[in-house]
Amino acid sequence: MKKMNTTEIEKALKTLSGWSLKDDMIVKSFTFEDFTEAFSKMTHIAFECEKQNHHPNWENVYNSLTIKLNTHDADGVTQKDIDLATSIEKIIGEA
Ligand SMILES: C[C@H](O)[C@H](O)[C@H]1CNC2=NC(N)=NC(=O)C2=N1
C-alpha cells in the first residue's frame, strides 16, 4: 500500500478526532476510568486489529493508553492506518 504524504495524512486526520502526525506515525492518547476499562478496550481493539491484520504500537500505563500507527512495508502512514484509527474511534466510543 502506498505511503501517504503529509498533506494527504492531515486531510485524512480531519475525519478523526485527536489524532496527530508525529515521526511518520499517527498518534493519539486516551485516558480511561481505570486499568480494567483501559485493558478491556485494548482487548476489543486487539480483535479488530487481527481482523484487519494491522497492529498498533501502543503503551498502557494504568488508565492511560497511547496508540501509534504506521505501516511497516511502506515505512510511513497508509490508508490502512487511517482505517484502523477509524475503527479504534468507534470501539472507544462504545460503552
Ligand atoms: C506479515 C503481516 O501481514 C504484516 O507484518 C502486517 C502485520 N501487522 C502490521 N501492523 C502494522 N501496524 N503495520 C504493518 O505493516 C503490519 N503488517
Image (cartoon, rainbow, N blue to C red):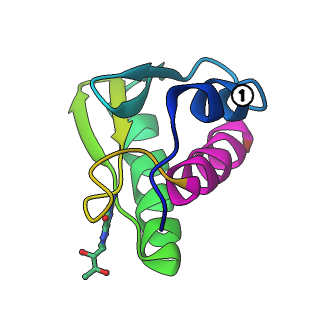
Identify residue type, mark 1: Lys
Which residue ends up furthest to the right in the rendered image? 15
Residue 72: in sight, yes or no? yes
Magenta stretch, residue numbers: 79-93
**Relative horizontal placement of residue 39, taking residue 30 as reference (left or right):** left
The answer as to whether callout 1 falls within 8 Å of ligand 1 is: no
Q: Quadrant of the C terminus?
A: top right
Residue in the image at 39% along x and 24% along y = 34
Residue 68 picture location, percent across and down:
34, 36
Residue 13 in magenta stretch:
no
Residue in the image at 53% along x and 60% along y = 80
Residue 32 picture location, percent across and down:
48, 23
In-front residue for pair 54/91: 54
Tally the marks: 1
Residue 33: in sight, yes or no? no
| Quadrant of ligand 1 in image | bottom left
Residue in the image at 62% along x and 24% along y = 10
Residue 69 picture location, percent across and down:
38, 44
Residue in the image at 57% along x and 45% along y = 85
In-front residue for pair 10/89: 10
How crowded is the residue under tag 1: few (<14 C-alpha within 10 Å), some, or many (20+)? few
Residue 63, above or below 55: above
Q: Which residue is mark 1?
A: 11
Residue 87 in magenta stretch:
yes
In-front residue for pair 41/48: 48
- Choose top left, top right, bottom left or bottom right for residue 61: top left
Tag 1 secondary structure? helix
Residue 27 picture location, percent across and down:
41, 27
Residue 25, above or below 74: above
Residue 31, above or below 41: above
Q: Tell me the chief SS of the magenta region.
A: helix
Residue 73, above or below 57: below
